[in-house]
Amino acid sequence: MSEQNPPAGGASQTQPGRQQSQPSTPTVEPEKRSRIRDIGPTWITAISGLIVALTGVAGVFIGRATVPGTSQPASPPSVTVSAGPATAASAPATSVSVTASAPTVAAGTVLVANCHIVLADQYSLPISRGTQCPFPTKENVTGVDWSGSGILFADDRSTLAELDSSSASYDACKKNTRYVKDISSLAAGDVICYVSKWVVAAITFTKTNNTMAVSPPAEFDVTIWQG
């Protein structure tokens, strides 16, 4: 067998039936690619959270730098002065009463004298501090009531007293304390005193009631004094 010498230059000849091998390109396995995809969003989320945290810390420092009373001087208090009329709180008004008081009437002063009255059955006669003769009425008043059966009634706040004499006066009525609420069987010349907190009156009957008449009226003169 003849010996074969390699070609000059050290180059080797390719044997027949063999292909010259090419350098291989590294490939990434599918499992590794999947792991990379899973790690990507996690890192993105972590970075986003870090940015938000840093932004919040920066906001805190900025807020502390602008808190009133630390780095900025406190603003002076504002005072509002309004011009206008004084109110009751600032300047109480002083009221002066100039109403005229009624003149004082002395006790025993004659208010009305010898007013002739005809008082029908179931009518009332107001007796008050008026200076005019009273007028009979059907209303419930302070005074006396007449019943056609021959009875004179006093209202709830006054009393009656019969005088023994026909001389009617303020002093005689004030001293007569035989007080009753009603008096019957009245005849001409009888004097009945009416006494209340405000007035004193003398009722002098001028006509004897006709007992045969149906519900006859009462006729009398009345004099009223200040009580």
Image (cartoon, helix red, strand yellow):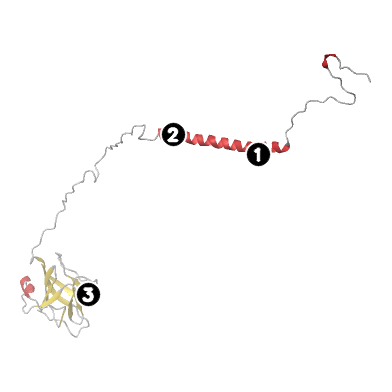
Report x, y in % for residue 101.
Answer: 14, 56
At x 23% / y 77%, what residue is drawn?
Answer: 122
Q: Quadrant of residue 186?
A: bottom left
Q: Which residue is mark 2?
A: 61
Crowdedness of circle 3 by 10 Å Cα count: few (<14), some, many (20+)? some
Callout 1, which amino acid? Answer: Asp
Report x, y in % for residue 66.
Answer: 40, 33
Q: Which residue is mark 3?
A: 123
The reply to whether the C-beta atoms of the residues labelled 1 and 3 are less than 8 Å apart is no
Q: Quadrant of the C terminus?
A: bottom left
At x 7% / y 70%, what residue is drawn?
Answer: 170
Disc number lying in front (2 or 3): 2
At x 54% / y 36%, what residue is drawn?
Answer: 50
Residue at far right of view: 1
- 43 w.r.t. 172: above or below: above
Callout 2, which amino acid? Answer: Phe
Which element type, helix, strand or loop, lies under badge 2?
helix
Report x, y in % for residue 58.
Answer: 47, 33
| Residue 113 in sight | no
Residues 157 and 82: in front is 82
Q: Quadrant of residue 90?
A: top left
- 93 w.r.t. 132: above or below: above
Disc number lying in front (1 or 3): 1
Labels 1 and 3: the sequence-earlier one? 1
Q: Which residue is mark 1?
A: 38
